[in-house]
Image (spheres, rainbow, N blue to C red):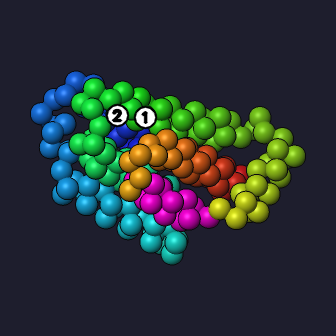
Amino acid sequence: MPVFILFSLYLSYLAETGVPMHSALISPLVSNLGMGGAVISIVGIFFKKFNEIVWYDLFLSSALLTWFSSWRPFFNEQAPMFFYFPIYFALIAAFVSFILLGDKQRTDRQTSEVIKAFVEKSGMHPWILMLLILGSLQLQHHFMLFPVLMTLLLVRFTLSGYLQSR
């Protein structure tokens, strides 16, 4: 998850300062590259080829890049969401990772069982959430759908990572 956190903070910095790199990120090529990385990571999660953390990190970073490059031209140059959403994603990723993955000794057995039951019986596989996130990128008028789905995926990743580490 560190790549996603650093990438989120970097996009927030670019959105706030407006450096020349900012304009290079707003292009169809960058959007297509981000979408390609997201699709590759969905296939990787589905077939469980490599470590899940790598695929989540790639997907979250690619989806954020696609969001930034494809949505930026449709909104006002001073739209605060391009500064605040990436910071929000970085804080949420760091917070839930720190709380659930940081100190496993503080979690009792009953809490671990509840987390395990939630992950196993929720019916929300990570690749389904990933497809919903990619679908939400096409809905610019529903701009809150993307951050809500990204938050759900971050929490889902952290809960599954918690179970794997126990």
- Percent coordinates x, y for residue 104 in the rendering: 71, 40
- Is 130 included in the stretch rendered in magenta? yes
Q: In whole angstroms, how far apart are the C-alphas of marks 1 and 2?
A: 6 Å
The residue lying at 43 percent from left, 59 percent from top is 134
Q: Which mark, residue 82?
A: 2
Q: Name the residue under label 1.
A: 85
Please identify the residue farthest to the right as the structure is shown: 110
* Horizontal side, residue 97 vs residue 5: left or right: right
Q: How crowded is mark 2: few (under 14 residues within 10 Å), some or many (20 or more)?
A: many
Name the foreground residue: 31 vs 94.
Answer: 31
Residue at point 41%, 29% (across, down):
84
Q: Can residue 108 be seen in this view?
A: yes
Magenta range is 125-137
Question: Where residue 128 sits in the image (x, y, percent)?
Answer: 56, 65
Q: Label 1 is placed on what type of residue?
A: Phe
Q: Is residue 154 visible?
A: no
Q: What element carries label 2?
A: helix
- Three-letter code for the amino acid on which mark 2 is drawn: Phe
From the viewer's perspective, tell me whether residue 9 is left or right of residue 124. left
Element on which disc 1 rests: helix
Residue drawn at x 49%, y 41% as measured from the top left: 144
Q: Is 78 left or right of 166, judged from the image as shown?
A: left
Q: In the rendered image, which quarter is residue 117 located in? A: bottom right
Image-quadrant location for residue 164: bottom right
Quadrant position of residue 97:
top right
The reply to whether discs 1 and 2 touch (Cβ–Cβ < 8 Å) is yes
- Note whether 69 is above or below 22 in the view shown: below
Q: Residues within 10 Å of mark 1 (few under 14, many from 20)?
A: some
Q: Nearer the viewer, residue 55 or 102?
A: 55
